[in-house]
Image (cartoon, rainbow, N blue to C red):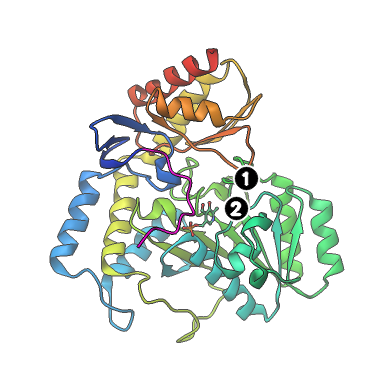
């Protein structure tokens, strides 16, 4: 059987990884400054993470959600404490799209409404409702398209107000990323956050904050939205939460009431996933990784800000968008092929997306900085 070819692949076959580095099958070493697409939060194969997973594998790796699983409670307690959302409850699932899908359903169950507002530049995943609120018509299949989903221009508060006025009483939720990742590292304005918070409050609509990419310490705070005065009704997480173990979750405000069968999943919150998630949170706390994300992000920004061809740097913690005066494809490919540094792109072809592990050192950052300087001087 052949693979269904949906991914354009680099001709690199990684067989080993440690910290910020990968090695391919020929023994070549690569610096991972993209965290395997914003996933590797505490570094590849972190010893504490490896041990937690290996120990769990010796005990029990899976049973369905029909039995007690104290690891889920331990994970929820730790997540509540580190995020400051102690009074929220947690639903565990397997991916970012699934977290958003469940959040959109929860909102709709809660207020019995159907319409959802999303923003230009957004990416929320590829499942049914999640892809419908993603601003990329190429990945929205006819089966997913419907007039329930209303697009608002990013940071356009007047348009948001108009949408609420035109759809009076019909809007179930507004979904927004803490920081737009796929959109090219774009920050919501304080005005937009205040406006959507107030509009949702007065119109019985739910605020869904997608922290799948910007969460778990990447922005220097546990959640990117925590730089603003807002407590979203639902917060979705995935990616860095499991450091490569597939998992996602929805943090749910006390205004929602759970009932048996309302949501469900076979694999979500399994023993191995919880062991991974707990280990990640322990490492983030024990190694002060949120502080390191801010410190190292500032270090990189200061070193590269005057480089040739860089027009703007958009950054919170270690979520960095480097806007160039030209498309970044060739620069990215030279960084990878000549200097062995993985970086990311975005839907804005001029933006290089940098998402290294949260525990990078200055020495590791310097490898990227020197390579970028060399490539941009050409
Ligand atoms: C902000 C955001 N939400 C949701 C998703 C979807 O996550 P997953 O690929 O785990 O379904 C992504 C993936 O890139 C994302 O960046």
Whether the residues at callouts 2 and 1 have beta carbons within 8 Å, the answer is: yes
The image shows residue 28, relative to residue 50, as above or below, that is above
The image shows residue 86, relative to residue 303, as above or below, that is below
Q: Which mark is residue 183?
A: 1
Q: Is residue 107 visible?
A: yes
In-front residue for pair 365/71: 365
Q: Which segment did they paint magenta?
A: 1-11
Q: Position of residue 327 (x, y in %)?
A: 62, 30
In-front residue for pair 362/220: 362
In-front residue for pair 78/206: 206
Q: Quadrant of residue 68?
A: bottom left
In the image, residue 294 lies in the stretch drawn in magenta: no
Disc 1 on helix, strand or loop? Answer: loop
In the image, residue 4 lies in the stretch drawn in magenta: yes
Q: Which mark is residue 177?
A: 2
Label 2 lies in ligand 1 vicinity (Cβ under 8 Å): yes
Question: Is residue 271 found left or right of 113 in the rendered image?
Answer: left
């Amino acid at each position: 059987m052949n693979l269904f070819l949906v991914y354009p692949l680099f001709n690199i076959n990684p067989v080993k990884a440690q910290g910020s580095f990968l090695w391919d099958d020929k023994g070549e070493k690569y610096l991972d400054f993209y965290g395997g697409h914003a996933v590797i939060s505490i570094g590849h194969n972190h010893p504490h993470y490896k041990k937690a997973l290996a120990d769990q594998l010796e005990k029990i790796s899976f049973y369905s959600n029909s039995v007690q699983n104290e690891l889920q409670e331990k994970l929820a307690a730790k997540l509540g404490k580190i995020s400051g959302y102690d009074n929220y409850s947690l639903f565990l699932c397997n991916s970012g799209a699934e977290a958003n899908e469940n959040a959109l359903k929860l909102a709709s169950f809660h207020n019995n409404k159907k319409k959802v507002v999303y923003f230009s530049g957004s990416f929320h995943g590829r499942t049914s409702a999640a892809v419908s609120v993603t601003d990329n018509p190429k990945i929205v299949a006819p089966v997913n398209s419907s007039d329930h989903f209303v697009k608002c221009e990013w940071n356009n508060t007047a348009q948001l107000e108009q949408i609420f006025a035109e759809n009076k009483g019909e809007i179930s939720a507004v979904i927004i990323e803490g920081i737009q990742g796929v959109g090219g590292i774009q920050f919501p304005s304080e005005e937009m956050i205040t406006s959507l918070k107030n509009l949702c409050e007065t119109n019985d609509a739910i605020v869904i904050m997608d922290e799948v990419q910007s969460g778990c310490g990447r922005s220097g705070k546990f959640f990117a939205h925590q730089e603003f005065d807002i407590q979203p009704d639902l917060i979705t997480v995935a990616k860095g939460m499991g450091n490569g173990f597939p998992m996602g979750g929805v943090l749910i405000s006390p205004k929602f009431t759970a009932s048996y069968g309302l949501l469900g999943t076979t694999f979500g919150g399994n023993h191995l996933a919880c062991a991974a998630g707990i280990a990640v949170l322990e490492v983030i706390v024990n190694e002060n990784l949120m502080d390191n994300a801010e410190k190292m992000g500032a270090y990189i920004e200061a070193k590269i800000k005057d480089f040739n061809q860089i027009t703007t740097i958009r950054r919170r913690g270690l979520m960095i968008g480097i806007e160039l005066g030209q498309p970044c494809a060739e620069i990215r490919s030279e960084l990878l092929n000549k200097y062995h540094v993985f970086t990311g792109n975005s839907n804005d072809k001029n933006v290089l997306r940098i998402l290294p592990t949260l525990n990078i050192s200055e020495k590791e950052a310097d490898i990227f900085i020197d390579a970028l300087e060399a490539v941009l001087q050409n």
